[in-house]
Image (cartoon, rainbow, N blue to C red):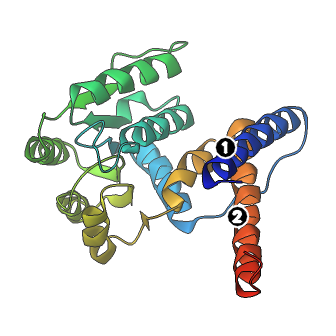
Amino acid sequence: MTWTEIGWVIIGLAVVLLLFFSLLFSRRGRYAVRVNPAVNAFVKQRVRSLEGGKQSQVALGDRFWSRSYPALGLHALSVSASLAETDLGAQETQVFAAGTGELALFARQILCGTYQGGYSSALNLILTGPTPYAFLAGFLGEMGLHSPGSVGLFGHYGPMGALILEAAQIKGGHPFAAAGSISAQAALFLTTRDLLIGEEIFLLPGLMDRSPSLQAAWISEDILRVLLITLLVVAAGLTLAGVL
């Protein structure tokens, strides 16, 4: 069996597991939700912002797609949907900022769909600018107009994201970051306490929206991870024994 065939077997197994657990969790049972202190602190601070009348500001990134990080824009949009659903009565106190027209368009469709039963013109979605520097200047300007209670950075951004969260701390807001480029994560690692890196980033939507489909994805990923580790150990043992 070639590596390509092994890859297709793993993909097929993933599809079967997703379908099985989606049907199972839609009827009964749930997968144990992981506990992440950084995410819990961010969600609680968003509630405090709502109660205190402060804005909860969310940055969706300075671009929708890049060759190095093609999935970060979609990840930011999935997070925006989860955040919108958790604050159905807080349209006036949350601001979503996007750096490009594609992100702004898709985010607007997501937010309008989320609020289709109770739309409010006070729902804020701003287009900061078409370049990373314009994104930085536009978001810092919005932060200067309204003192934030919490600031979340998602999607694609560079090391300048550290400047945004530093400004949030100066303004008394609670900073939180997930995703970003490797250089951004390196800069934020030294300046931001609540920072998700690596695999934790892609678990974030499920930590905010505990739907059966996301929980099915979690358990499918865990099963595949265990199987891959087992296969690697067995293959290494067979190689040492001279079988492979």
- Determine the image quadrant of residue 104: top left
* Residue drawn where x is 56% and y is 67% of the image: 37
Tell me the quadrant of the picture where the N terminus can be found: bottom right
Q: Point out residue 21 in the picture as x, y percentages from the top left corner.
A: 82, 41
Q: Quadrant of residue 139?
A: top left
Q: Which residue is mark 2?
A: 228
The reply to whether residue 115 is visible in this rendering is no
Percent from the top left, x then y, of residue 165?
Answer: 25, 60
Q: How many marks?
A: 2
- Label 2 element class: helix
> In which quadrant of the rendered view does residue 80 lie?
top left
Tell which tag, 1 or 2, sits nearer the viewer: 1
The three-letter code of the residue at mark 1 reads Trp
Q: Quadrant of the C terminus?
A: bottom right
Residue 178 showing in the rendered view: yes
Q: Which is more N-terminal, label 2 or label 1?
A: 1
- Residue 237 lies, in percent from the top left, at 75, 82
Query: 61 or 191: nearer the eye?
Result: 61
Q: Please report the residue visible at 79 percent of the width from the left and 38 percent of the height from the top.
A: 16
Task: Give SS at disc 1.
Answer: helix
In the rendered structure, find residue 8 and report the number of the disc placed on it.
1
